[in-house]
Image: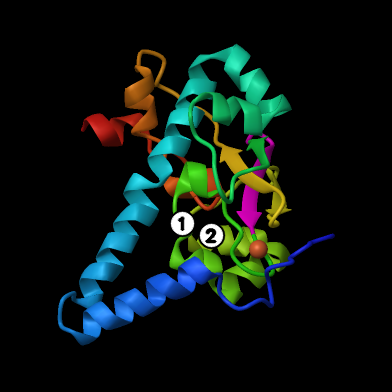
């Protein structure tokens, strides 16, 4: 599959390099604990960053016109909610169905839809995930605890510098009475990458 990666073999961009040097200096001076920096990054990757994507998905679940727009032009639909910017200039939403499960990877590096999901998790950037997600997606999903019935087809989308994907998981059953905010709380980062599903509603209220 075509995969244009102009940045793949390039050195880190100047901002990444500056941040790395800054962190090195702060750690050397004893001003920050590297474990604390990792914890902040992890919080951003798992909690803060993906909340924008969760808002997009929850709206798609409750607003059919928005869902249509998201399917036709995800960049514009997401941008209309105020979520746009670097690493998300060209977005495509891929919708799960009862017979189709979508999974996102970047086989060559770590292209990821920053405006809706925040920072990529460490495993997303790992060589093992990047190669195995394509070769044996069903086995990879099982390792994430997601066992899909054999009749569900898995479609793997290879992100590029030009095009980033957002998985729109299926709305869980038993959520008919929930508000948009309550629905958003069910939508995990992994469910928007395709390595997980939304949380079942009883596990949130209980
Ligand atoms: Fe990439």
Q: CA distance from mark 1 to mark 2?
A: 5 Å
Label disc, if present, on residue 142 of the rendered structure: 2
Residue 19 placement, left or right of 105: left
Element type where label 1 sits in the image: loop
Q: Quadrant of ligand 1?
A: bottom right
Residue furthest to the left in view is 30
Decide if residue 109 is in sight here. Answer: yes
Q: Residue furthest right?
A: 2
Q: Position of residue 196 (x, y in %)?
A: 49, 49
In the picture, the quarter occupied by the N terminus is bottom right
Give the residue displayed 54% in from the left and 73% down from the top: 126
The quadrant where residue 2 appears: bottom right
- Residue under the point 53% across and 14% down: 63
Horizontal and vertical percent for residue 134?
71, 63
Let me know if residue 191 appears in the view: no
Contact (Cβ within 8 Å) of mark 1 with mark 2 = yes
The residue closer to the viewer here, 189 or 172, is 189
Label 1, on which residue? 145
Question: On the picture, is 164 further left or further right than 170?
Answer: right
Q: Identify the magenta region.
A: 96-105
**Mark 2: secondary structure:** helix
In the depicted view, which residue is nearer to us: 28 or 164? 28
């Amino acid at each position: 599959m075509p995969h244009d990666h102009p940045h793949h073999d390039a050195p880190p961009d100047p901002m990444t390099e500056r941040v790395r040097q800054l962190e090195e200096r702060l750690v050397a001076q004893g001003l920050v604990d590297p474990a604390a920096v990792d914890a902040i990054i992890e919080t951003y990757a798992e909690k803060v960053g993906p909340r924008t994507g969760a808002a997009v998905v929850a709206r798609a679940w409750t607003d059919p016109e928005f869902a249509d727009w998201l399917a036709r032009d995800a960049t514009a639909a997401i941008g209309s909610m105020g979520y746009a910017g670097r690493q998300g200039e060209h977005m495509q939403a891929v919708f799960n169905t009862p017979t189709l499960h979508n999974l996102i990877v970047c086989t060559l590096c770590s292209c990821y839809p920053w405006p809706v999901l925040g920072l990529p998790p460490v495993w997303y950037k790992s060589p093992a995930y990047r190669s195995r997600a394509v070769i044996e997606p069903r086995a990879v999903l099982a390792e994430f605890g997601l066992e899909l019935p054999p009749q569900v087809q898995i479609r793997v989308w290879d992100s590029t510098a030009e095009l980033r994907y957002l998985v729109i998981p299926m709305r869980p059953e038993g959520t008919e009475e929930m508000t948009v905010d309550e629905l958003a709380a069910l939508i995990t980062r992994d469910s928007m990458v395709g390595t997980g599903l939304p949380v079942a509603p009883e596990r949130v209220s209980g």
